[in-house]
Amino acid sequence: MLVGMSTVPATSLPYKLACLCDLRDKQGRVLLLRRLREPNRGLCSPIGGKLDMHTGESPAQCAQREIREEAGIDVPIDRLHLVGLISEQAYEGKGHWLLFYYRVLGHVSVSRTEINEGSLEWFHPHEIDALPLPETDRRIIWPMVRKAEAEYSPDRPGSRPGFFTLHIDCSKPGPDGKPGMTWAIEQQS
């Protein structure tokens, strides 16, 4: 199929835009969703969701809306700090994703524990590696988030996490025949 002057393979996958939201409480714990639905059913991930592209929603507006819908709290956009841009090529062979990873600056308090998509649970950062996580999160995204968080202190005025962009290619099988992944850090500060 030809689109403009470029050739698009017949097996091209849909591209989805979404945000992930990193919320922390006064104890420094991270709020994660133990998912009941695909993608990542049964796994733990930050809350978030797809951008409403029909209304022209911005990534920050999406993060704000998802936090309100899932965590039940209103967070002003000026408390949302873009920590990362993550592109995932051929994730689970079903589509490409562009993820905007937002960290809520400061502490939040969330009393909800159950939502339609799963259960909300608080975890100390050192507990995350022992959780059931998507492999991309375990091997790539959480280590990048930890690096971005290294200099950030929510109690220090003006403090901000770092920033990264990365590309994860899930399109090629690994040496064992299972879905593999390669990645490249495209920017880090």
Image (cartoon, rainbow, N blue to C red):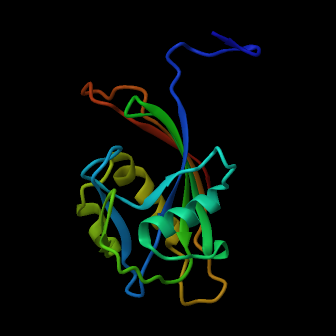
Screen quadrant of the C terminus: bottom right
Residue at 59%, 89% in the rendered image: 156
Up-down relation of residue 24 to residue 10 (above or below): below
Counting the numbered discs, the total is 0
Q: Quadrant of residue 111?
A: bottom left
Front residue of this view, candidates 183 and 55: 55
Front residue of this view, candidates 135 and 64: 64
Q: Position of residue 3 (x, y in %)?
A: 70, 16
Query: In the orientation shown, which residue stands out farthest toward the top?
Result: 1
Q: Position of residue 86 (x, y in %)?
A: 54, 48
Q: Is residue 16 visible?
A: yes
Q: Quadrant of residue 122?
A: bottom left
Residue at 47%, 82% in the rendered image: 108
Residue at 32%, 31% in the rendered image: 179
Residue at 50%, 73% in the rendered image: 150
Front residue of this view, candidates 149 and 89: 89
Query: In the orientation shown, which residue stands out farthest toward the right?
Result: 5
Residue 60 lies left or right of residue 31; in this view the side is right
Up-down relation of residue 40 to residue 79 (above or below): above
Q: Position of residue 137 (x, y in %)?
A: 38, 52
Q: Position of residue 157 (x, y in %)?
A: 64, 89
Front residue of this view, candidates 129 and 72: 72
Q: Is residue 89 visible?
A: no
Screen quadrant of the N terminus: top right
Residue 89 lies left or right of residue 189; in this view the side is left
Up-down relation of residue 4 to residue 177 (above or below): above
Q: Quadrant of residue 110?
A: bottom left
